[in-house]
Image: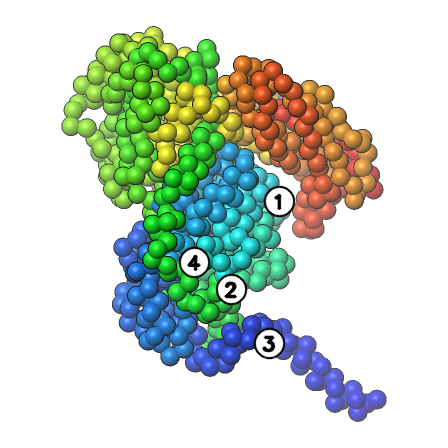
Amino acid sequence: MNIIKKTFLPFLFHLAILYPLLGQTKSEIPLVQELLQKMTLEEKIGQLNLLTPGGGVATGAVISQNVEEKIKAGQVGGLFGIAGPAKIRIVQELAIRQTRLKIPLLIGSDVIHGYKTTFPIPLGSSASWDMELLERAARMAAREATADGINWNFSPMVDIARDPRWGRIAEGAGEDPYLGSAIAAAMVRGYQGEDLSDSTTMMACVKHFALYGASQAGRDYHSVDMGRVKMFNQYLPPYKAAIDAGAASVMTSFNDVDGVPATGNRWLLTNLLRDTWGFQGFVVSDYTSVNEMVAHGLGNLQTVSALSLKAGLDMDMVGEGFLTTLKKSVDEGKVTEEEITRACLRILEAKYKLGLFEDPFRYLDDSRPKKDILTAEHRELAREIASRSFVLLKNHQDVLPLRKKGKIALVGPLADSRNNMLGTWAPTGNPNLAVTILEGLKKAAPNSSIGYAKGANITDDVELAKRVNVFGPRVVIDERTPEVLLKEAIDLAKQSDIVVAVVGEATEMSGEAASRTNLSLPKAQKKMIQALVETGKPIVLVLMSGRPLVISEEFELPVSILQVWHPGVEAGNAVADVLFGTYNPSGKLTATWPRTVGQIPIYHSVKHTGRPPATGEFKKFRSNYLDSPNTPLFPFGYGLSYTTFTYSDLHLDKTEIGPEESLIIGLTLTNTGDFDGEEVVQLYLRDMERSITPPVKQLKGFKKVSVPKGESVQVTLTLSPEDLKFYNGELQFVAEPGDFEVFVGTDSDSSLKASFVLKQ
Ligand code: NOJ
């Protein structure tokens, strides 16, 4: 017995220690394993290097140099910012024909809202609450991008954002983890399809892991400070949903998490992502985010590169910290070759899954761009999704929908502004292909007389214009004086039956590095709106923006307001569809709109306070403001229709459920207005008592239903046992027995409710 113990136990012990390591450095894919065995340390490090040859959008100070030489030297694992089969073939051939091991390159891109057929900005399309549509859009984006040689997409961006000062709120799905998770999964399914090696699908990259949307004060690239309970309950679910849906890669964020930058955060990239969530793909940094850890104060480039690799980062975007320091770190014993092998293995496995080893040129079919890009079918989808993204914020005296006759004055700086239709982060789109609002309206209503006047500049602030015009002229300050511009618009308005004023933000007033502290419309536009109102004509504001704006003053005016975000390549046609009622708007806000900037952060799933404000009056020693109500201007989930809906007969199939049981919620939805319409029926849950403070309400279900005018439909929604769970103080995902309330209705303010009990 002793002999057995002596002989075998140390062996077993070693096996137990070594096996996980071997498991991480040994691929189950024979081809990858064979390759790894042949690779030198330098060749492995080369695979961890992602470069951009320039010519695309550079989102940092650095552009990669000597890319061709580096590819030939086996120092590049992938490229981004390059497109088109012909160009990509050149670099892929370098990798295949001129390197020792002939390893193909990953070709990445930021296909954020459509490829060449630009869809609305993601915050806009999220307002459709239509998962089937969003999946279809992602699928089409994949078809287009792969036709142009792309095999890896830096999307979906799933950062929960509750601070509209942060310009990148435009790129995501808003404030809510439940809706955000559903959208994240739909987009991953759309991009990746069933088979990554299919030449019409591409690999998704969920970003920015993690918590990037919680940048302090809404300032981009700023620090994040958040407790774990909030993280797990409110911010992490969409990343996890994307991973559960099969996202094959993850991009780290620029911010720190618990004091360690995400790019070098072992807890985040290994303990949580791999050990807890079981992620099997690879992790790429954001643009020079390894290098930026030097500025964060974590050491020099060699130190932060080693830290990142050890934390679980596999690929270094643009900064070349891995390329230039890892060999030295191995020599000095600061990282092991196994750690490099492990990262390399993950990248090679991704290339294998994309089918690149079988055929490195599989995404490079010269006949495809013509067949698959900007097709009539794709543009039709862009139009459909844009019209479904619009949110009717106010319909004063039911002015909308417009009739296609009479005289329409189309005014405002965004009414005929092709450069501002696509929205932020549309580097693959072409603004020249966009349909302006003026063109869309004229085409849709050839029998109306449509006059146009600019009326005002987007802003008269020359310095702001300069900052916004980094990717081309977005704010064009007219040669005419503001007075002349305004007079022209007012004269036109006076001669017309109705005024449509297209106002808001230029595309690059939101997006990356586009934080704002003032979310009101620029002064020039406010003045124009006020002057238009004084004409006494009916006024429709078509509002464009990449974020919730502060429009409390405009809301008080006798105007109608249609929020259209930045609608994409089919902007004008989609706006015409909704203004003229060809499509009855059904969009619902996915981020709360504040009354004032001072209310931010503002979102529906806030916590209760021990001192709630008194109803209808200000009271001292309560949780209220001296100068503003607590309530937002528009709550999460808000959006009107040309018709009206009533909710009735709310009923639950049980009043008590056990821990494994689902609850079925039924209701009657009646279209009481004069138009057929679609409604997003929303379900919110309130946990009445639990071990950590619950939110006042949380979205836990929704269904988009279509109801013909005058008719009623029965709607059922299901609460699953999972829906009652939350992460408790010990970060266990549990449901706690007790009383619950469910609310159903048209937005997060709805008060139609029922109760049930969760038993032990
Ligand atoms: C920086 C951005 O943060 C990220 O979202 C993007 O994917 C990369 N640049 C690459 O363009």
Q: For the residues carrying marks 3 and 4, which lies nearer the camera in this image? A: 4
What amino acid is labelled 1 in the image? Asn
Left or right side of 436 for 579 = right
Q: Quadrant of the N terminus?
A: bottom right
Q: In terms of depth relative to the viewer, which is nearer, 622 or 138?
A: 138
Count the marks: how many?
4
Q: Report if the CB atoms under discs 1 and 3 are less than 8 Å apart.
A: no
Vertically, is 661 above or below 538?
below
Nearer-N-terminus badge (4/2) = 4
Left or right side of 474 for 266 = right
Nearer-N-terminus badge (2/3) = 3
Q: For the residues carrying marks 1 and 4, which lies nearer the camera in this image? A: 4
Nearer-N-terminus badge (1/4) = 4
Nearer-N-terminus badge (1/3) = 3
Q: Residues within 10 Å of mark 1 (few under 14, many from 20)?
A: some
Q: Report the residue marked by disc 3.
A: 22
Q: Report the residue marked by disc 2.
A: 353
Nearer-N-terminus badge (3/4) = 3
What amino acid is labelled 2 in the image? Lys
What amino acid is labelled 3 in the image? Leu
Q: In terms of depth relative to the viewer, which is nearer, 88 or 508?
A: 88
Nearer-N-terminus badge (2/1) = 1
Q: Does the image show residue 636?
A: yes
Q: Residues within 10 Å of mark 4 (few under 14, many from 20)?
A: many
Tell me what residue is drawn at x 43 percent, y 50 percent: 143
Q: Residues within 10 Å of mark 3 (few under 14, many from 20)?
A: few
Q: Report the residue marked by disc 1.
A: 233
Find the distance from the CA under tag 3 to the CA under tag 4.
29 Å
Q: Secondary structure at mark 1?
A: helix
Q: In terms of depth relative to the viewer, which is nearer, 333 or 651?
A: 651
Q: Quadrant of residue 723?
A: top right
Query: Hey, which residue is sitting farthest top in the picture?
Result: 536
